[in-house]
Image (spheres, rainbow, N blue to C red):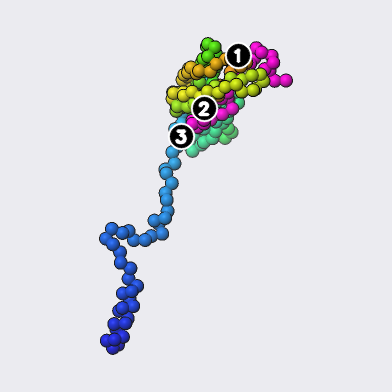
């Protein structure tokens, strides 16, 4: 190859070289992949579980006991595991009182086993438990966290005064502090009675707190019940 041809080839190759600064990262297809945050698992609550021992003739025959400090509601799902590889779940057909038990029985034969049981407590459950006028211009509202295993963050309760049947007169929002599991708080709001017939309060009105049940957030004051004109036909 003559000198002139070598110079042409070298110049062409140099044109293909892209300069990279000392601080630049080399391009990579992986650079565009964004990793999702790690999955946060809801902590579970342990329950008592006892098997029948080595003399049993049924493959699954154990008792799950509510060892928590609150009643487990109807519809709660309970999971169980055994040390010989068994597992399963059950849904409570009725509330399970403190110290109460349910049985798990499945056919088969084993040489005895031990077991554990637990449930997922879910999200907080904010409920208005009381709403009433305390003066011609003020009212009090009590909001409770009816989940006895999970704390609830701060929220907003909305208090409305209404004419029968449901004509709005006034509406006031009030801040409710964070509520520990099973706790409640009472707040006072400035809302005149005027010509209104009753009050209505809605917990977690701005949906600040993720809840397990949003169907039980609203309560009406006693006037709604005692005034027959407020009763739906």
Helix, strand or loop status at disc 3: loop
Counting residues from the start of the chain, the first of labels 1 and 2 encountered is: 2
Counting residues from the start of the chain, the first of labels 2 and 3 encountered is: 3
Q: Which residue carries the number 2 mark? A: 204
* 204 or 60: nearer the viewer: 204
Q: Which residue carries the number 3 mark? A: 42
Q: Which residue carries the number 1 mark? A: 222
Q: Quadrant of the N terminus?
A: bottom left
Q: Nearer the viewer, mark 2 or mark 3?
A: 2
User: Can you name the residue that lies furthest to the front here?
Assistant: 194
Q: Position of residue 72 (x, y in %)?
A: 53, 23
Look at the image and give the residue range highlighted in magenta.
Answer: 205-233
Disc 2 crowd rating (10 Å Cα; few below 14, some 14-19, many 20+) is many
Helix, strand or loop status at disc 2: loop
* 134 or 124: nearer the viewer: 134
Q: Look at the image and say whether residue 210 sits in the magenta stretch.
A: yes
Up-down: is 70 above or below 45?
A: above
- Structural distance between the alpha carbons of marks 2 and 3: 21 Å
């Amino acid at each position: 190859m003559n000198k002139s041809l070598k110079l042409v080839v070298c110049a062409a190759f140099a044109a293909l070289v892209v300069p990279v600064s000392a601080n630049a990262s080399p391009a990579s297809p992986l650079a565009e992949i964004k990793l999702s945050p790690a999955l946060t698992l809801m902590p579970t609550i342990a329950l008592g579980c006892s098997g029948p021992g080595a003399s049993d003739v049924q493959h699954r025959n154990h008792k799950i006991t509510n060892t928590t400090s609150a009643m487990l509601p109807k519809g709660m799902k309970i999971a169980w595991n055994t040390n010989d590889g068994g597992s399963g779940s059950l849904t409570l057909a009725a509330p399970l009182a403190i110290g109460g038990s349910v049985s798990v029985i499945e056919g088969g034969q084993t040489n005895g086993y031990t077991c554990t049981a637990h449930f997922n407590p879910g999200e907080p459950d904010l409920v208005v438990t009381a709403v009433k006028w305390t003066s011609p211009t003020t009212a009090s509202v009590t909001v409770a966290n009816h989940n006895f295993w999970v704390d609830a963050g701060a929220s907003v309760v909305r208090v409305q005064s209404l004419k029968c049947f449901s004509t709005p007169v006034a509406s006031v929002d009030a801040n409710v502090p964070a509520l520990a599991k099973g706790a409640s708080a009472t707040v006072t709001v400035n809302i005149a009675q005027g010509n209104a017939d009753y009050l209505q309060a809605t917990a977690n009105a701005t949906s600040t707190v993720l809840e397990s049940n949003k169907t039980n957030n609203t309560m009406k004051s006693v006037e709604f019940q005692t005034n027959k004109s407020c009763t739906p036909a």
